[in-house]
Amino acid sequence: MYFLSITDPQNWLLAGISMLVVFAILVILVAILNIFSLVSKKQTSIKTKTVKGSPEQSKGLEKASEEDKAAVATALYLYFEEINNSESRVLTISPYDSAWGAQLNPRL
């Protein structure tokens, strides 16, 4: 008994319909992703327009208090100190005598 006969027209119909469904789903996914990219581009362009036109951006340094400036300076100092602090990456293991190790290894 041959289930998958090449001459059977139902098998060709089933194969054609399954390929059409797969390609239709792919086309729908590509369309949805294109719509998402267009929406995100519009939102980023709206955000950049509002940021570029804001007058507070140019006056940000004058409005900063002395405490804010000190906090930023401290954060930068600690960041650069951490970058320069490199460890030698050497493990030092010293033997530790205990009764537990002697029970597991009778040669000790």
Image: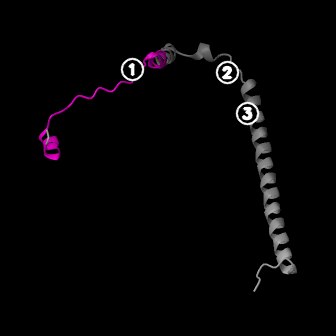
The alpha-carbon separation of the residues under discs 3 and 2 comes to: 15 Å
Q: Residues within 10 Å of mark 3 (few under 14, many from 20)?
A: few
Which residues lie in the magenta part? 77-106
Label 2, secondary structure: give it: loop
Q: Which residue is mark 3?
A: 47
Q: Nearer the viewer, mark 1 or mark 2?
A: 1
Query: Is residue 16 shown above or below 90?
Result: below
Residue matched to label 2: 56
Residue extending farthest to the left is 99
Residue sitting nearer the eye, 2 or 95: 2
Closer mark to the observer between disc 1 and disc 3: 1
How would you rate the neighbour count of disc 1 (Cα within 10 Å): few for under 14, some for 14-19, many for 20 or more? few
Residue type, mark 1 in image: Ser
The circle on residue 6 is: none
* Position in image of residue 106 (x %, y %): 13, 44
The kind of residue tagged 2 is Glu
Question: Farthest residue in the front direction?
Answer: 107
Closer to the chain start, of discs 1 and 2, is 2
Sooner in the amino-acid sequence: mark 1 or mark 3: 3
Separation of residues labelled 1 and 2 (CA atoms) = 47 Å
Based on the picture, tell me whether residue 32 belongs to the magenta stretch. Answer: no
Q: Under tag 3, what secondary structure?
A: helix
Q: In the depicted view, which residue is nearer to us: 80 or 41? A: 80
> How far apart are the alpha carbons under marks 1 and 3?
46 Å
**Looking at the picture, how far across and down is residue 9, in whole percent?**
87, 79
Q: Provide the residue designation for mark 1.
A: 88
